Image (cartoon, rainbow, N blue to C red):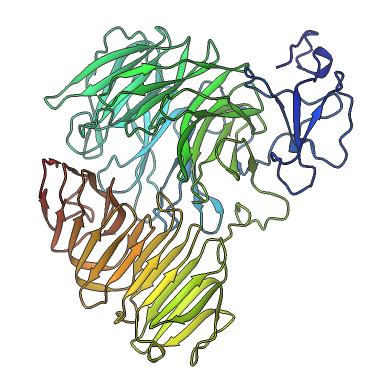
Amino acid sequence: VFDDTDADGFQDVGEDDLEGITVFADLNMNGLVDQFEPFSVSDSNGEFTLVGVQPQRLSFIRQSLDANRTATAPIGVQFAPGPTPVLTQATGARSASVTDSVIAVDLDFDISNSPDLVVINPHVGNQVQVYLNNALTGEVTLAHTLTLSDEAVAVRVGDVTFDGAPDIVVGLENGSLDVFVFNFGGGFSPAMNVAGVANLSSLELIDFDADGDLDVLLTSTSSGDLTRLENDDGDFIPLSSIIVPSADSGGDIVAGFFNLDGLMDFAFVDFETNKVHIGLQQVAGGFNFAAVSVGQGPISIAAGDADSDGDMDLAITNVTDKSVQLLRNNGTGAFTAGTARTFTDTPGSVAIGGSELTPQKYLGVSFTNSNFGSVVPVQLGSGTLGTPQPILVGGPQDSIALADLNNDGVDDLIASRLNGTVALLENRTGPFDGTYLAFPRAGDELTGFVFGSTGIGSEATITIDGNDLKITDTGAAADQLTVRTDGTSVFISSAGTLLTSISGATGNGTSLVTVPLSQFTGGIFFDTLVGNDQLTIDFSTGNFSRQIQYLGGDPTSGSGDKLVLEGGSFASATYNFTNASDGTINLTGNALITYSGLEPILSTINSANVTLNFAGGSETITVSHFMPGLTTVDSTLGEQLSFPNPATSLTINAGSGDDSIIVSGFAMRNGGFKASLAVDGQAGDDFILL
């Protein structure tokens, strides 16, 4: 924004005027730099005084069509080292050549369903660090530090041992791989070193032979060919390279289902030819290739549905012309490069994220020579990139990730910085206004690292409504409610306060209320209104003779309202999916459970026979062995559901419509799936992939 005309290494006020600059500052000292606290600067010399405002609580934004970066602070005001880093690794500097040093993925499958973090720390002790995130409590804690045999280049997480648990694969400077296998004691095995390729640039886990397990593709800066390592029960066997036409060098690589045929495809950037090469896997084996010309010096690539049209797009950063681009997918795996959005600073990695509250998505971009990252909105329909929003992250970054850390339905920003730290920035007010806040904040109670107030545990009232027992949220905070019965009474507990005046009930004003079943003749009704709520139905003290109805309210998708079933065993369990957020659950010997406005459902109850009934309409149903002993089912028109592998049978009735049923990852060892499997496509033209 400013020119460094005096060549002192700083772009400052003396080298341009400040007219047209809007300053956002934390004037009310509430810990937020937000859109309600701007003041304009008209003095061309920028001579004004800020009193009682911390420098890191300032953001300077030029309001013009071509603006895409922030201005520096005026003379006399210095930015602090940046937001307090929440994940402090070993001290030292990091190379700016790594574009994927942090990954957000659920590693521990905890009840909060929240993404954890895997961070490589090249040049700083050759380590991988695993941080576990609990979105319910806001804690992020260092759980594992894994030692590498050389400097790290890239990292991926996936089930390479085919046992349903997440393993970590790290590409090293010497061209080899370190593989850390998850063990069921809660940790990872020592590194298994695997030969790779000289001048290794990046790696990706992809089932390139369609046998159900994850193999490895390696790229190299010295060749456009891809090195293949076939996964053979956790051992990696080198195969002949994949020859990619017209490719001169291999850079960052991603995998995904680009043409929705159930086979994994890949795409990688080619720095030498300024192209992205796409490989579409074929049913008969091998790949069909295409190349798309992009900007100068492509360095990073990400895959995701950026334009919300139902297929997977690609986003890239170009380091030479300092730009970011979106490559839109037409649904068949053919990509078209859009107009690049250029920056003043040098971009590093790119990520695709968004909000469950709106279909609009955005790109996250790191910068290797700036204290700021950026989010770039993607316009619906056209896929055009909007005006970037600068995000203060407190130092140059080599990698960026976008993930919903605190389960509020909006992706937060994770920046891996070159000084060996990682900054977590909560998206407080939506994905497009640039209001992010680093953790921790002053006044927060820190246990490990806490995301500030999570808003969990609001007040709820318990009343008799007609014949029903009704539990109603009285606020917008996230509710954590549990209900159980002993056949005589109903016990309702909460992370917040419960209020009741029902005759014979006990516990008014506490977190546990007991209501005799004799006080009502109908069902049990929960209405939790807005917020990311959770109802746990506990069968440990007995089954329910009264129907339970759970109205979750907003949000109704992604990591929104949850239903948890625990503490019981049933001969059969039938899940009926009315749509993506509504349905019923029928358990043998238990009254009907009805729900609406939910996503997802987590069951830990044991059922010998499980039946899944999907409604009408064309949908894609995915059934996977997500972790040892656990089956996960998701659908475009049904609820996401996880449950223990049934002992006897799993039946899937797809309903009417032209459905695609994809069943994968069912290991027969290490606690795998051993029941019979029946899939009935029912009406319509259906596609089943086993």
Which residue is depicted at the point 30% across and 42% down?
159
Q: Nearer the viewer, residue 63 or 13?
A: 63
Residue 366 percent location from the top left of the image: 56, 27
Residue 482 percent location from the top left of the image: 44, 72
Q: Is residue 200 visible?
A: yes
Q: Nearer the viewer, residue 441 or 446?
A: 441
* 163 sits left or right of 117 in the view: left
* 342 sits left or right of 517 in the view: right
Residue 574 percent location from the top left of the image: 20, 64
Q: Nearer the viewer, residue 524 or 467?
A: 467
Residue 398 percent location from the top left of the image: 55, 26
Q: Residue furthest front?
A: 466
User: Is 407 located above or below residue 214 in the figure?
Assistant: below
Which residue is depicted at the point 36% across and 90% down?
488
User: Is 528 located above or below residue 309 in the figure?
Assistant: below
Q: Is residue 151 visible?
A: no
Which residue is depicted at the point 50% across and 82% down?
513
Numbered label tally? 0
* 137 sits left or right of 652 in the view: right
Place residue 610 in its image quadrant.
bottom left
Q: Quadrant of the N terminus?
A: top right
Q: Quadrant of the C terminus?
A: top left
User: Is 273 located above or below residue 612 in the figure?
Assistant: above
User: Is 350 located above or below residue 290 in the figure?
Assistant: below
